Image (spheres, rainbow, N blue to C red):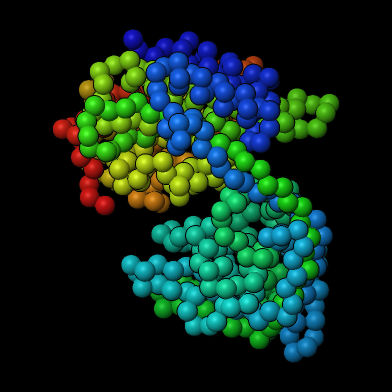
Amino acid sequence: MPVTPDDLRRHIEVLASDGFEGRQPGTRGESKTLAYIAGQLQRLGLQPAAGRGSWYQPVALVESRPFSQRATWSVGGRRTELRRRDVVLVGRSPIERVEDAPVVFVGHGARITGRNIDQLRGASLEGAAVLMLRQAPDGFPDLSERIRAVVAAGASAIILIHDDDVAWATVRAGLSNRRTRLQMEEVAPVQAEVPFGAADRLVAQAGADLDELVRSAGSATFRAIPLDARASFDVSTELRSYTSNNVVGRISGSGKSGESVLYLGHWDHLGICRPEGFDRICNGAVDNASGIAMLLEVAARLASGERPQRDILVMATTAEEMGLLGARHYAANPTVPLKSIVAALNVDTVAIHGKGEPVAVIGRGIAPLDRLIAATAAELGRKMDEDTEADAFVTRQDGWAFARAGVPAVMVGGSFSDMQQLGAFLAGPYHKPDDDLRQELILDGAAEDAALLIALGVKLADPRLYRPQPR
């Protein structure tokens, strides 16, 4: 039977209810959410697939909030204390001190072996305070990967320079709140973030020109440049370690290829996000109770149909809103070899469009997968969205964690076809208490997309119909 809007609404009304408290990781809302998703997968006949017979894959997280800070910049023995409004500091441990560290500018901090780019060469980073551009050009590693490279090179502190695209006051307010990272993530003892103007003044004191340094960092031959300056930091940070969970189930295939198709969507949202006296709960009805609803209904149809040859994995990820953390954790600690996953289909924010929207693909460019999606859409009477506007969101969704790890990963459907419609949601209820059950949920387009995802799953799970390109 096809998926109906009512099928989807039934799950959303549970997951986005006030009783689930906005599904924030590490809260009672998480416990209720995990129990609901695992219970539904078990009812459908899936097997637990998170390892050791469990539905749950633990994801260790660390929450941090700046508490007190002092940063000084020294040139020729003359010390300048950075104004509190010009810097935000967090430490790896509750108390961190870095004394008189040499300062090295590393551009974007990128190492790209295939392109012979190594911006960390040229100076020793052992014990250094590394000055690094936070934003990087397209095609460069993301920030977490660049930070890992700098930490591995021995830096004692990383000073990230923000560009002026967003007002520093807005950025600083966000940085001063609680932030969460993976416990396994490698971080420097001290991480500082400064606006471009403040960094420009500091670099000028060292006799250099930051604009010129930035221009030089755009060259493939750029190498790290020591500056005639030293930096010291005294940082106190509030830290809280806790464990959240991905939920993973499996529809076992009949073949012996050892291969899998992965469906995923994030279960988490922002929890209790306002003080008392207001509507306090960010329920996340569209983002992403609707995606989990679709995930469950697609799993129901695939589990009740003809047994696939390849395994089908169904995963609800945690901490997507904190930086794709659950997906990144799974990609680093998979329960099956990543090379055995022939395709990953992510589902997110699906309850905003009606029937008949063209099929957009986020992550287009994987030839065998592109062809299969286009052919399947045509069989269902769907048109393809041929522009690439949706790819503006490619790094903002869980599939990116798998694409970076070499897994063919896409998002497919109508939600990301009409940018005006999507923009209205993002400028409206998105990440606010208004994304709740009081708003109109548009689910006929989501039901149509569910049919497409089911048809894709049937084909992706059949080695005769789909072979991934070698990787």
Q: Is residue 266 visible?
A: no
Rendered residue at 81%/74% (across/down): 81
Rendered residue at 39%/18% (across/down): 45
Q: Is residue 172 visible?
A: yes
Q: For the view shown, which residue lies furthest in the bottom direction?
A: 76
Residue 126's quadrant in the figure? Answer: bottom right
Residue 189 percent location from the top left of the image:
67, 65
Q: For the view shown, which residue lies furthest in the left direction?
A: 464
Q: For the view shown, which residue lies furthest in the front direction?
A: 52
Rendered residue at 62%/41% (across/down): 243
When the figure is inspected, residue 361 is found, relative to residue 239, above or below; the finding is above
Residue 220's quadrant in the figure? Answer: bottom left
Residue 250 percent location from the top left of the image:
38, 28
Rendered residue at 51%/24% (across/down): 38
When the figure is inspected, residue 331 is found, relative to residue 313, above or below; the finding is below
Q: Nearer the viewer, residue 240 or 226?
A: 240
Residue 38 falls left or right of residue 91: left
Residue 420 percent location from the top left of the image:
49, 33
Residue 310 percent location from the top left of the image:
26, 32
When the figure is inspected, residue 393 is found, relative to residue 72, above or below; the finding is above
Q: Nearer the viewer, residue 370 or 392?
A: 370
Instruction: Tell me how many marks there are.
Output: 0
